Image: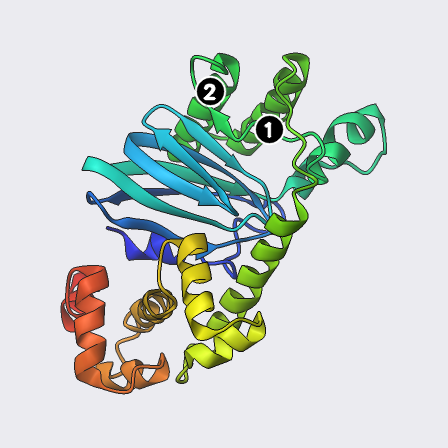
Amino acid sequence: MDQTLRQSLKESQVHGNARFPFASYRFHFAPGAHVVDSHWHKEAEIFYVLQGEVLFQIDTEYVPVKAGEALFIDGGDIHTGHARGDQGCSFCAMVFDPAMLASSQYDVVQEQIILPFQERKATLPRLIRPETDASLMAHITEMVHLTAAKPAGYEAALKGHIYLMLYEAKAAGRMANRSRSGAGDTTQTERLKKAIAYIQGNYHRPIRLSELAGLIPMSEGQFCRFFKSMTGQTPIDYINSYRVRQAAELLRQPEHKISDIALDVGFGHISYFVRVFRKIMLCTPSEYRKQLI
């Protein structure tokens, strides 16, 4: 498992650059693995499964995605995923800022296609399958090929494929309006975002369940049930997973001692850090560092 790629999915990651805000990532996970920790980013994402099956949760919606199918995630959606079945899964995630589709001239395309897409009033279907969206799948598979080969001018082709996907979805009546969700769902999502933001801003120090529950506010028991239902992880599992991802990045810097890294990311005891790291990364911190050499 490439932990660099996994780390790249955290919400603070810059996808692409200011000149071309588009990036692609390829992953492979073992059976039963927690594929994507609960997170969100302002960019949209096309998630194409190459092998196996992934059960995704997007806000409060559950969507199984099989090999040869794709998932479209709007910017701002909290999402998490788990590998299903006994063969693990491989996939390509393409993340892009919808603003890259805008032009300086406010024309009919901006008014009728791009702006509604950015506002989620006319966006791509959530689950894209060959049997229902053959033309959209053709564009996605070609985009996957382009991001791997990167021929000269491929950026123009990627942008063109997204434009054509929007056109073909609109022409086929396959556009979805996800600009409004139920008040309950919106409240749940915003509560989860608040808790995750707090964890990511304070992971380097001890975090008590009472602190997280007080943000909502809920009792500690209610909060634990709420967090597990929304992310598939307990609050402690999520905190540990996030800390381990930060530690994995610090391990790339040989001047940092492993014991210091453990303390820097919020683990009070080196033995506990090593135990949690091994459980999540399937190797010890020192073994992980050796793999980087």
Q: Position of residue 242 (x, y in %)?
A: 37, 67
Whether tag 1 and tag 2 are in contact, CB under 8 A, the answer is no
Position of 246 compared to 283: left or right?
right
Task: Say what secondary structure mark 2 lies in.
Answer: helix
Residue 124 shows which numbered tag?
1
Q: Nearer the viewer, residue 116 or 107?
A: 116
Real-space Cα distance between discs 1 and 2? 12 Å
Position of 270 compared to 197: left or right?
left
Position of 112 compared to 169: left or right?
right
Q: Nearer the viewer, residue 203 or 288?
A: 203
Placement of 235 over or under 129, stated as above or below = below
Placement of 41 over or under 112, stated as above or below = below
Q: Amino acid at mark 2?
A: Met
Query: Quadrant of residue 56 in the image?
Result: top left
Task: Say what secondary structure mark 1 lies in.
Answer: loop
How many numbered circles are shown? Answer: 2
Q: Position of residue 54 (x, y in %)?
A: 33, 37
Residue 137 shows which numbered tag?
2
Q: Is residue 154 visible?
A: yes
Q: Nearer the viewer, residue 60 or 55?
A: 60
Position of 157 compared to 205: left or right?
right
Categorize mark 2 by other alpha carbons within 10 Å: few (<14), some (14-19), many (20+). many
Residue for point 34% across, 70% down:
236
